[in-house]
Amino acid sequence: MLLSMLLLTGCATTPQLSEATRQQVPERVLLEGVPFHAQRDYQCGPASLAMVLQAQGAKVDVDTLIPQVFLPGRQGSVQPEMLATVRRHGHIPFRIAPNFDSLLTEIAAGHPVVVMQNLSLPAWPVWHYAVAIGFDLDEQTLTLHSGMTAKRSVAFSRFDATWARSDRWAFVALPPGALPASLEAEPALQAIADFERVQGAAASLPAWEALVVRYSGSAMGYFALGNARHANGDSEGAEQAFAQAVAQEPEMAVAWLNLGLLHREQGETRQARQALQNAAALPGPWQQPALEALAAL
Amino acid sequence: MMNTLCRYLSPLLITALVLTSLPVAAAPATPGAGLITTQEALKAERSVEDRARIHEILARDDVQQQLVAQGVDPAEVKARVAALSDAEAARMADQLDQLPAGASVVGALFAVFVILLITDILGLTDVYPFTR
């Protein structure tokens, strides 16, 4: 029985770090600025959220978070609502890539990471949220604010065994304008877009500005920045951003379309026609709206 | 009486709902309308099908009802659902029962105490802190 369990779950092995990560992160890190909240009953979700949000300067306590994220029928908190609650408090939840390199890179960058673990075996799961706040490469340990214990030290191998059972689910919660250290442009962009849907263009503008500074080749990033600037009444800035988007990616029909619509709104018919013609020349879902806008010019 | 009423009302309500959500879901940018939003552009880029988009929109009503059934304060439900992304709302609607809920409950596990004790000592699990 036990043998079959071990075969099913695999053995606890120490996760390997890439050479690049080893070079980048310090030997040991401990984020002292992350407050600890011991969980009450089954409320490791709200407690973990309070820790990461307060670490970023948000004024929110566990008692406020419980009715916002705790699910009485499940006696726990589910992953989508953990992310959603971060949005409600004006911060952007970025899921990080499911590996040790991303985890340690974020901690080294000063970002506490909410991790989901199954502390037990898949057959009798004990799902748990904790906040990773430090590590020691020499001792091969991770430091967690977890459950009732602050700064709990866990071997990399044991932690990875429990983390792997949630498919290494983890996220950082950052104020708009800050970006994760480990993430690529595409998932970062989606995370900001999801935040913008909830909190609006004014709140997300700093995040888009930061995104195009970090990923200056992201045409979609410039497109999103153009939209956010336009929604905030900055037509000139929006025009520049859309122009950047099509400069990065001349085939990006939707950026040509918005550039044309913006020129039309400004009464610049000649430039509007030029941009809309470019959009209409590209096959895809934006061809039809571009043709209609041209016809109405 | 109630049944007959429902029989006539339901199709009406469904039509109204679908009609009001379709423009948001599918066809953006009629002439005179504003710019294409980033969210619309991302969905088009990832070629999310229209059917999936309508599903995502309807999902929010579904999730609201499920949250109330799970004991969430009805006054909180709207704000909780509003903070979900479309994809998250769809995931909640489809599989809320199967989603793992972080809670760290150990109580029900007493029957398998010995097995977990051994796996704890082997460093495969992290159920009993006293094993270290």
Image: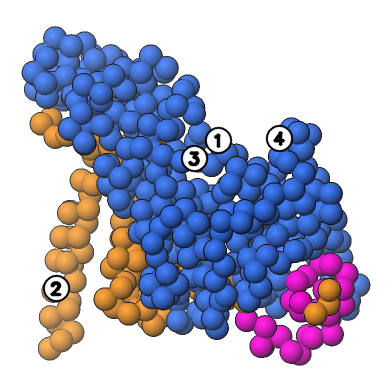
Chain colours: A blue, B orange
Start-end of magenta stretch: B105-129
| Relative horizontal placement of residue A32, taking residue A100 as reference (left or right) | left
Residue at 50% x, 36% y: name it. A186
At mark 4, the secondary structure is helix
Callout 3, which amino acid?
Leu
**Chain letter behind tag 4:** A
Say the numbered circle drawn on residue B38. Answer: none
Q: Nearer the viewer, residue A139 or A218?
A: A139
The residue pinned by badge 2 equals B9
For the residues labelled 1 and 4, the Cα–Cα distance comes to: 17 Å
Q: Nearer the viewer, mark 1 or mark 4?
A: 4
Q: Nearer the viewer, residue A251 or A14?
A: A14
* Same-chain status of marks 2 and 4: no
Residue at 29% x, 78% y: name it. B74
Q: Nearer the viewer, mark 2 or mark 1?
A: 1
Residue B113 is one of the magenta-drawn residues? yes
Answer few, some or many: residues within 10 Å of disc 3's Cα (few below 14, many 20 plus, some between 14 and 19): many
Q: Nearer the viewer, mark 2 or mark 4?
A: 4
Residue at 16% x, 19% y: name it. A263
The residue pinned by badge 3 equals A179
The residue pinned by badge 4 equals A24
Q: Nearer the viewer, residue A70 or A283?
A: A70
The residue pinned by badge 1 equals A184
In the rendered image, the residue lying farthest to the front is A32
Answer few, some or many: residues within 10 Å of disc 4's Cα (few below 14, many 20 plus, some between 14 and 19): few
**Chain letter behind tag 1:** A
Residue B67 appears at what percent x and percent y? Answer: 38, 75
